[in-house]
């Protein structure tokens, strides 16, 4: 199965700062079928990005995804208070679908 | 509005059984694949099982294969997960999630989760 490794584990940032999250795959992600999800405490995950770079409906344009093959990133250009939480990458090109272990973005 | 509402979570002893349900609304049920994804307390997300739009194809994580069975009832717009021989490591919040596609392959790959329920908690403990 495709192992996804996210880094860093935790980021402590202030509103207004920019941030880049990394997701590295153990093998090439087929068709760049890579999604990003946001999860806030006590809530279900919410789709942010699919196909590595396409924003989902209602995803603000301060979120952007990029990458291909084995290296992918999620960038938040300017953090807003509602952006603090957990972020997971997930590949859906190979069976089984797998998730990264998550990156926590916390307020400094 | 797409809604997925899980139910059936409970506390059960190791070796026990449980049946989870996911009531779906707001979309044409038999045109989308559906999955179960779980999250152990304080841990990350783990895909558990998937079923194609028409129910003809299913797929399971190795960790639950042979113990869990997924099914769907289009007359009631409901996805179910029958869980047997439960273990402590099955303790988790179980989410029902819709895939963005309904293809046969989507039971196992090729689709992302565009809508999620709020989850139902399963606790396996003696």
Image (cartoon, helix red, strand yellow):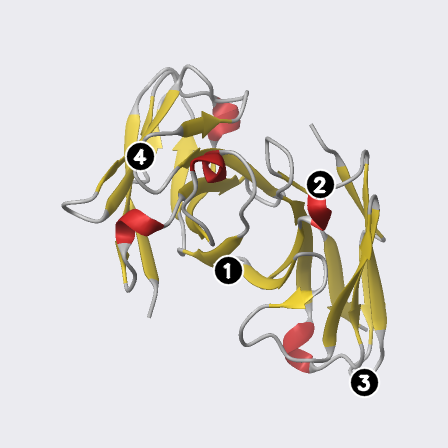
Confirm whether circles 1 and 3 share one chain: yes
Confirm whether circles 1 and 2 share one chain: yes
Badge 1 marks a residue whose secondary structure is: loop
Q: Residue at x 67, y 48 (%)?
A: A33
Badge 2 marks a residue whose secondary structure is: helix
> Which numbered marker is on residue A16?
3
Label 4, label 1: how far apart the Cα atoms are: 31 Å
Q: Residue at x 78, y 82 (%)?
A: A15
Label 1, label 2: how far apart the Cα atoms are: 32 Å
Q: Is residue A29 toward the left or the right of residue A39 in the image? A: right
Q: Position of residue B70 (x, y in %)?
A: 34, 30
> Which numbered marker is on residue B6?
none
Q: Which residue is mark 4?
A: B55
Q: Which residue is mark 2?
A: A30
Label 2, label 3: how far apart the Cα atoms are: 34 Å
**Mark sitting earlier along the chain (2/3):** 3
Q: Looking at the image, which residue sits at the far bottom?
A: A16
| Circle 2 or circle 3, nearest the eye | 2
| Circle 1 or circle 3, nearest the eye | 3
Residue A50: name its quadrant. Answer: bottom right
Q: Chain of mark 3?
A: A
């Amino acid at each position: 199965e495709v192992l996804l490794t996210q880094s860093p584990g935790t980021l402590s940032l202030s509103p207004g700062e920019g941030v880049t999250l990394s997701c590295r795959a153990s093998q090439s992600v087929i068709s760049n079928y890579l999604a990003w999800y946001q999860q806030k405490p006590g809530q279900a995950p919410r789709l942010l990005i699919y196909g590595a770079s396409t924003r989902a409906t209602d995803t603000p344009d301060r979120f952007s995804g990029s990458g291909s093959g084995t290296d992918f990133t999620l960038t938040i250009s300017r953090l807003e208070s509602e952006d603090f939480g957990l972020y997971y990458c997930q590949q859906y090109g190979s069976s089984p679908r797998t998730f990264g272990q998550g990156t926590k973005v916390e307020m400094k | 509005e797409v809604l997925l509402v899980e139910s059936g979570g409970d506390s059960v002893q190791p070796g026990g059984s449980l049946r989870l349900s996911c009531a779906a609304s707001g979309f044409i049920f038999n045109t989308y694949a559906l999955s179960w994804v779980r999250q152990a307390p304080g841990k990350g997300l783990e895909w558990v099982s998937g079923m194609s739009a028409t129910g003809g194809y299913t797929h399971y994580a190795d960790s639950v294969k042979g113990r869990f069975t997924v099914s769907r009832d289009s007359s009631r717009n409901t996805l179910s997960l029958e869980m047997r021989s439960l273990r402590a490591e099955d303790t988790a919040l179980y989410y029902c999630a819709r895939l963005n596609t309904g293809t046969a392959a989507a039971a196992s790959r090729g689709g992302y989760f565009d809508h999620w329920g709020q989850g139902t908690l399963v606790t396996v403990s003696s």
